[in-house]
Amino acid sequence: MKAMPSPESTLAPLPYPPFEMRELVGITDLSYYDNPTASLIFGDNVEIDLYENVLDFGCGCGRLARQLIQQVPRPRSYLGLDLHKGMVRWDQENLAPAAKEFEFRHHDVYHIGFNPSATSPGTAEFPVGDRSISLVIAHSVFTHLVQDQCEHYLREVARVLRPGGMMYSTWFLFDKSVFPMMQEFQNTLYINEIDLTNATIFDAKWLIGVSSDLGLIVRAAEVPLIRGDARRIYFRRSRPGEVGAELPVDNAPIGRSPPPLGPANPSAVGLRGPAAHGERPI
């Protein structure tokens, strides 16, 4: 692995995103935005050399970006994409200055709550070259995409990952075999009749099949803390003859973890008046 830059000292501690943004992404506890030990944020699941060129698809208000800035070694290059203009603006003004390797861009695709522009397309290509990325991060993204969007972005992941590259992602999964009324082409369940992307649940067998067809195999997967909650799955660009891991059976305790309802106009968060500077570490 090539030597990667280590974090540089800054004039002031990294700010935390403001509460209204943390509430928007559903995680308000500041500890989830911090990496005080400078450790690899995905532990043993992602090898150190895969942090070289990172694409953070759905970077939000920088929860994982902030931890990566604190990580040793820091990524050689990082690109964060998000469809929420206000959160991207906050990342650009508060996180990017602390790490010259980090860039944040608005991924201008339509979303009923976060980017309700009638002229924005439903999907867009990643603004990076083929096989140029070592690690794709997609935390709480595929849990909010409809089926055709999911297929598009899985193709994009397969396009941009370099040989041996990985994707960390989260998914809501179900077993379609116990839903006999579903058509062959129907592989997704939705919980909200107004906003289908509020939470989307994919058939596990379909996901593995689509991913495999694109050359992506499961390297590791975790059981959620609550049965049926989002599952962390690590996909690898497959090598010749490589076989993917099995998804573990979800026997987690039954509980509840509904997504946040959010404010009435979520797309305006971070765009009303001067940019919010967030909270400073004590």
Image (tube, rainbow, N blue to C red):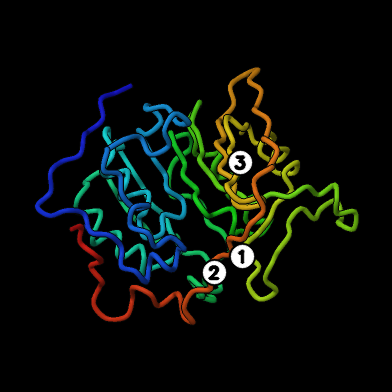
Q: Name the residue under label 3.
A: 223
Q: Name the residue under label 2.
A: 111
The quarter in which the N terminus is drawn is: top left
Which three-letter amino acid code belongs to the residue tagged 2?
A: His
How crowded is the residue under tag 2: few (<14 C-alpha within 10 Å), some, or many (20+)?
Answer: many
SS for callout 2: loop
Residue 169 in which image quadrant: top right
Dots 3 and 2: beta carbons under 8 Å? no
Q: How far apart are marks 2 and 1 (CA)?
A: 8 Å
Earlier along the polypeptide chain: callout 3 or callout 2?
2
- Can you give x and y, in whole percent of width and height, for residue 27 in the image? 43, 60
How crowded is the residue under tag 1: few (<14 C-alpha within 10 Å), some, or many (20+)?
Answer: many
Quick check: 197 left or right of 76?
Answer: right
**Which one is in front in this view, the residue at disc 2 or the one at disc 1?**
1
Q: In this view, does 128 lie above or below 199?
A: above
Question: Which residue sits furthest top?
Answer: 241
- Residue pictured at 33% horizontal, 73% vertical: 270
Q: Mark 1 points at which residue?
A: 197
In-front residue for pair 251/184: 251
Earlier along the polypeptide chain: callout 2 or callout 1?
2
**Which one is in front in this view, the residue at disc 3 or the one at disc 1?**
3
- Residue pictured at 90% horizontal, 58% vertical: 181
Q: How far apart are marks 3 and 1 (CA)?
A: 22 Å
Earlier along the polypeptide chain: callout 3 or callout 1?
1
Which three-letter amino acid code belongs to the residue tagged 3?
A: Val
**Which one is in front in this view, the residue at disc 3 or the one at disc 2?**
3
- Can you give x and y, in whole percent of width and height, for residue 125 in the image? 51, 52
- Residue pictured at 56% horizontal, 30% vertical: 237
Dots 2 and 1: beta carbons under 8 Å? yes
Q: In this view, does 77 lie above or below 236?
A: below
- Can you give x and y, in whole percent of width and height, for residue 138 in the image? 50, 48
